């Protein structure tokens, strides 16, 4: 089976991490993609990479916040336990 791929545009972060690729097949009209169309696809890939970066940062921030909240709750429970044991002694 032959893949009918005309254009492949990498979706990369500014740091060079590849998130994926944009694969475009042949046009139905049979004409080649113009320079303007290729530039548009590159712009789409850049915006997609920026969105992926933003989502990854948001995930990291949410994870850090949840970890901090978990630590606060564990410290609260530890303090309650220690005060309870101290009171009993």
Image (cartoon, rainbow, N blue to C red):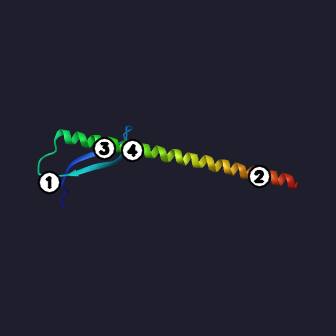
* Image position, residue 1 (x, y; %): 19, 62
The answer for how far apart the CA atoms under marks 1 and 2 are is 70 Å
The answer for how far apart the CA atoms under marks 1 and 4 are is 30 Å
Q: Earlier in the sequence, mark 3 or mark 2?
A: 3
The answer for how far apart the CA atoms under marks 3 and 1 are is 22 Å
Q: Which residue is the extreme one toward the bottom?
A: 1
| Residue density around tag 1, few if under 14, some if 14–19, many if 20 or more, within 10 Å | few
The answer for how far apart the CA atoms under marks 4 and 2 are is 43 Å
Pointers 3 and 2 in contact (C-beta within 8 Å): no
| Residue density around tag 3, few if under 14, some if 14–19, many if 20 or more, within 10 Å | many
Closest to the observer: 3 or 37? Answer: 37
The answer for how far apart the CA atoms under marks 3 and 2 are is 53 Å
**Residue denoted by label 3:** 45
Pointers 1 and 4 in contact (C-beta within 8 Å): no
Q: Earlier in the sequence, mark 4 or mark 2?
A: 4
* Image position, residue 32 (x, y; %): 13, 46
> On residue 81, which mark appears?
none
* Image position, residue 12 (x, y; %): 34, 42
Q: What residue is drawn where x is 30% and y is 45%?
A: 10
**Residue denoted by label 1:** 28
Could you tell whether 84 is left or right of 5 in the image? right
Closest to the observer: 54 or 14? Answer: 54
Secondary structure, mark 4, is: helix
**Residue denoted by label 2:** 80
Q: What residue is drawn where x is 22% and y is 51%?
A: 24
The answer for how far apart the CA atoms under marks 4 and 3 are is 10 Å
Q: Earlier in the sequence, mark 4 or mark 3?
A: 3
> On residue 51, which mark appears?
4
* Image position, residue 36 (x, y; %): 19, 39
């Amino acid at each position: 089976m032959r893949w009918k791929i005309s254009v492949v545009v990498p979706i990369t972060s500014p740091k060079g991490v590849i998130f994926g690729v944009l694969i475009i097949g042949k046009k139905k009209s049979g004409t080649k993609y113009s320079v303007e169309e290729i530039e548009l696809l590159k712009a789409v890939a850049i915006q997609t990479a920026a969105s992926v970066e933003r989502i990854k940062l948001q995930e990291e921030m949410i994870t850090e916040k949840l970890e901090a909240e978990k630590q606060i709750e564990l410290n609260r429970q530890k303090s309650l336990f220690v005060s309870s044991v101290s009171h009993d002694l």
